[in-house]
Image: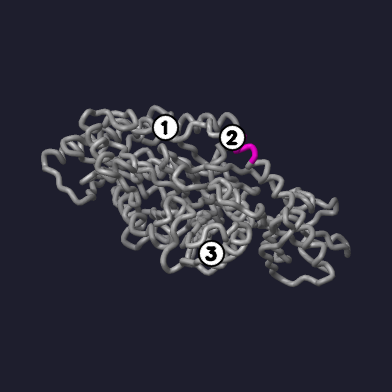
Amino acid sequence: MAGMLLSNAERFYIWDGVEENFRSDGRSNKDYRPMELETDVVSSASGSARLRLANTDVLVCVKTEIDTPKSDKPGLGSIEFFVDCSANATPEFEGRGGEQLANRISNLLQRAYHSSQAFNLKQLCIFEGKQCWKLYVDILILECGGNLCDAVSLAVKAALFNTRIPFVKAALMDGGNIDLQLSDDPFDSKRLEVGTAPLLVTLCRMDEENIVDPTAEEETCIAVSIVVGVSGNPALYTSSEDTTPSDHKCTTISMSGNGGILPDAMKIVIAEGITAAKCLDEALGRTLLQERNRTNLQKKDSYGFLK
Amino acid sequence: MPGPELLSSQGLRLDGRRPDELRRIRCKLGVFTQPDGSAYLEQGNTKVLAAVYGPHQAAKSKLSTEGVVVNCQYSMATFSTSERKNRPRGDRKSQEMSLHLRQALSAAIKTELYPRSQIDIYVEVLQADGGAYCASVNAATLALIDAGVPLKAYACACTSSVAWRGNHPEALLDVGHVEEAAGGVCLTVAALPSVDSIALLEMSHRLHMDYFEVVMSRAMQGCKDIEIILDKAVREHLAEGWTKPDVITI
C-alpha cells in the first residue's frame, strides 16, 4: 500500500522478525491473520459476501444477466470481474486513482478463472447458441490492510457459492427469438458449482524466506511478491459424498515488485502457494457449509457492518 | 386529484408505514480503522458507508485561507441498484450528489477553524432503496463526529412526498424507492435541526404552493427525528469508550 511511510528501523524490525520466523504481530511466516466472512449481505444481488481479513475489507456481489453466447463458444456462459477501489480505503483512490490496482486484480481473477478446470462455464448455459447467463462479479474494496488478492479471491468464491440462479420455467420459440420465462420464487433456483473455483495466494519473498498474508507494513518492505492461483477441491464444498475430489492445480502465476527470484526458489514458492491454497480452501469450504446449514435451519441474523 | 395510490384506505403506505414514520435507522460509528472517522448507516434497505480523512494539509489547487476545504465524493457501488450500474462514480448524478453533500456538510462544519486545510469525505452507497442522498448526509455526519471534526450542529437530511387521501393532502416522510418511482413530488431537505436552519433544499416535480408548508414541515420533523436517533447512536458509541478491542497494529 502506498502512503505508508516506514523508517529504516521499522523495516529492519520487520526483516529481522521474518528471519526469526516470528513476525511483528506474533505470527509465524506461514500464518494467516484471522478472517471474518459473512455471505448474503446485500439483498439487491444474487449472491454476496463480505470478508474482513484483519483490516482488509472487501465486499463482493454477484449479479446475473441474460446474454447471448459468443459464436465460437455456443455452450458457454461468461463471467466478468469488476474491481472498484473505494476512496473509503485511502484518499489516493479518489476519482480514478484506484484504477490501476483495480485493473491488476480484475485481470488476475479473469486469468485464474479462465481455465475450464477452474470454473465450469457450461453450467451457465441456458439454450445452446442462443442464451446464457452472464455473471458480473463486482468487488468493492473498502479498506486495504495488506494482502488484497487473497482476500478478494476468498470473498469471490464465497459470493459465487452464495449465488442463486433462477430456473427457467418455459421458453417460447418465436421465429429465431427465444422468450424466456424465469421463476419468480427466490427459492426455486439453482446453486452454482464453485468447488473448483481458484483461490489466489500471495507469497512474498524476503531474503531467503517466503511469507504469506503480508500486512500493509510488510508489503512496503518486500522486493518481490508472487501470486499463485490454485483451483479448489469440489469435495470440500458439498455435503454429499459422491463428488469426486480433484487435485489442486495451478491456474495462474503472476509476479510483481521490482526484485527478482531464482528459478529454484520459484519452485519452492509455487509449492508453498499450493499448500497454502489447500489449507485456505479447506477452511473456506468448511465455513461456507456450516453457514449454509445454519441458514437452512432458521433465518439468519444478518450482521453486515453493524457488528 | 388523481395520483398513484400511495396511501391505503386505512392510511398506511405501500410498505406498511404511517405517513409520519421513518424507516428503521440502524447505524454504527467507527467501522474502519484506517480512516480518521467512519460510519455505517442503514435506513430501511438503503445502506451507506462513509469515511472521513483529515483535516490535513490542502492540495495546492484547492487551498483556501478562509477556512477548511470540504472535499466530498459520492459513489454508488455497481451492485447497489436492481439494474447493474456500469460505473460507480463520475456520472452526472454522482457528481451532483457530491456537490450537494458538500453544500450540506460545509454548513455543519466549523470551517473557520482550519484555514489552509482540507477534509475528505467519501461516501459509498452499498444498496440504494430511495433516499440515498439523505442516508449519505446522515452517515457523513456520524463519520465526521467519529473523526472529531467540530460541528455547529448535526446535519440531518430527510425526504418527504405528498399523497392524496380523498381531497386531503397527506405528507409522506422518508420516501422509499417504490414511492419515489411512482413519480410524485420529492422534497429533499438537509437541515441543522438544533439551530433550526436549512442547509440544502431540493424539490423535484410540481407541487402547489398551498401544500408546500405541509410537506416542508413534515420533512423538517423527519430531520428532527433523525437527529435524536443519531445523537443516541453517538452517545452509545462514546459510552462504549475505547475498551473495545481494536485491530492489532504494530
Residue A133 versus residue B19: which sits nearer the camera?
Answer: B19
Q: Is residue B161 above or below residue A213?
A: below
| Quadrant the C terminus of chain B occupies | top left
Q: Amino acid at mark 2?
A: Asp
Crowd tier of the residue under label 3, counting other residues whose Cα lies within 10 Å: few below 14, some 14–19, many 20 or above: some
> Secondary structure under badge 1?
loop
Q: Are marks 2 and 3 on the same chain?
A: no
Q: Earlier in the sequence, mark 2 or mark 1?
A: 1
Residue A116 versus residue B110: which sits nearer the camera?
Answer: B110
| Quadrant the N terminus of chain B occupies | bottom right
Question: Residue A180 location in percent, x, y?
Answer: 53, 57
Q: Give how far apart the Cα atoms at labels 2 and 1 are.
A: 23 Å
Name the colouring of the figure.
Answer: one colour
Question: Residue B131 location in percent, x, y?
Answer: 64, 57
Q: Give how far apart the Cα atoms at labels 3 and 1 are.
A: 42 Å
Classify residue A223 as left or right of residue A181: left
Classify residue A183 as left or right of residue A191: right
> Secondary structure under badge 2?
loop
Which residue corresponds to mark 1? A238
Residue B111 versus residue B43: which sits nearer the camera?
Answer: B111
Q: Amino acid at mark 3?
A: Ser
Magenta-tinted stretch: B235-239
- Decide whether the magenta segment is chiefly helix, strand or loop: helix
> Secondary structure under badge 3?
helix
Residue A155, picture quadrant: top left
Chain of residue at mark 3: B
Q: Residue at x 43, y 29 (%)?
A: A239
Question: Residue A94 location in percent, x, y?
Answer: 43, 59
Q: Give how far apart the Cα atoms at labels 2 and 3 are.
A: 32 Å
